[in-house]
Image (tube, grey):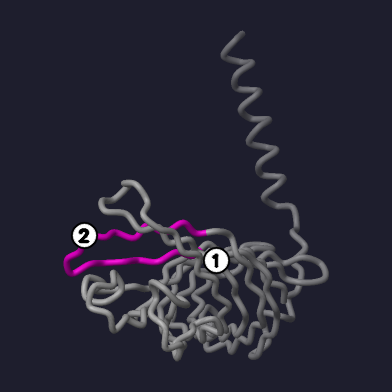
């Protein structure tokens, strides 16, 4: 009796699955997939800090990032059904705290806050799967250019006693993933992306005993962007 009941339950379950599989799915925004040029905009958050490497140093710098915001436009050119070239000019803002210590995790000698507003321009390749009903996962990768409005690059004071100085023009690379969600009136695309600076962004001091001069080998931004895009 138990075996018969079990078989009845299994058959009922398989019947329900078959019915759901055969049910017609209404696909939204089908005309958008046929367009060669796509436009949109995005809003989101970022969390950035600095990657720091040393030649030799008795001073270590610890970073404490905070949440910032991103906003920008999206332009896409479909190269293939599954490949799109995208440019996403926008603005991003963030503040980092730099703490100086004699040893990693040790007592802090001094603290500096570094704020930054950037014009962020990524050029990306978007590789999408075929459409799965009303969703389409994708990955993105490419290069980016940042103009730092808060760089203080030409300030004559040194970093330790004056304004913190970074380079105005910076380059990086980005990788990430997301999903296009086809809704009745628009396409919503949540995504997460990592960004990594290529060049050294620090303007070194002229003072020989400054912690920003000889010991610093590399000082570059790294961070995570979480965006909601609308097409």
Query: Are the residues tagged 1 and 2 within 8 Å (C-beta)?
Result: no
- The part of the chain drawn in magenta is 48-65
> Main SS of the magenta segment?
strand
Foreground of the two, 26 or 92: 92
Corner quadrant of residue 143:
bottom left
The residue under label 2 is 58
Q: Residue furthest top?
A: 1
Q: Is residue 221 above or below residue 155?
A: above
Give me the C-alpha separation between circle 1 and circle 2: 26 Å
Q: Is residue 47 above or below residue 122?
A: above
Foreground of the two, 129 or 230: 230
* Secondary structure beneath label 1: strand
Corner quadrant of residue 19:
top right
Q: Residue at 56% across / 84% down in the picture?
A: 149
The residue under label 1 is 95
Q: In the shown orientation, is residue 72 left or right of residue 139? A: right
Q: Residue at 28% across / 50% down in the picture?
A: 104
Judge the density around disc 1: few (<14), some (14-19), many (≥20) Cα neighbours within 10 Å. some
Magenta includes 15? no
């Amino acid at each position: 009796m138990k075996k018969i009941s079990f078989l009845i339950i299994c058959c009922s379950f398989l019947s329900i699955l078959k019915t759901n599989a055969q049910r017609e799915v209404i696909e939204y925004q089908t005309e958008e997939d046929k367009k060669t040029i796509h436009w949109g905009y995005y809003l989101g958050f970022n969390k950035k800090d600095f990657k720091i490497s040393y030649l030799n140093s008795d001073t270590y710098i610890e970073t404490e990032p905070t949440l910032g915001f991103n906003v920008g436009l999206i332009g896409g050119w479909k190269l293939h059904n599954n490949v799109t070239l995208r440019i996403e000019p926008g603005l991003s803002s963030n503040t980092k705290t730099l703490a100086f210590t004699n040893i990693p995790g040790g007592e802090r000698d001094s603290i500096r806050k570094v704020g930054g507003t950037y014009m962020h321009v990524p050029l990306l390749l978007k590789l999408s799967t075929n459409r799965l009903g009303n969703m389409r996962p994708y990955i993105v990768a490419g290069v980016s250019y940042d103009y730092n409005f808060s760089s203080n690059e030409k300030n004559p004071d040194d970093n330790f006693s004056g304004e913190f100085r970074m380079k105005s023009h910076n380059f990086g690379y980005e990788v990430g993933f997301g999903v296009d969600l086809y809704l009745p009136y628009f396409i919503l695309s949540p995504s997460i992306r990592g960004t990594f600076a290529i060049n050294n962004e620090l303007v070194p001091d002229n003072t020989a005993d400054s912690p920003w001069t000889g010991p610093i080998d590399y000082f570059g931004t790294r961070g995570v962007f979480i965006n909601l895009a609308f097409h």
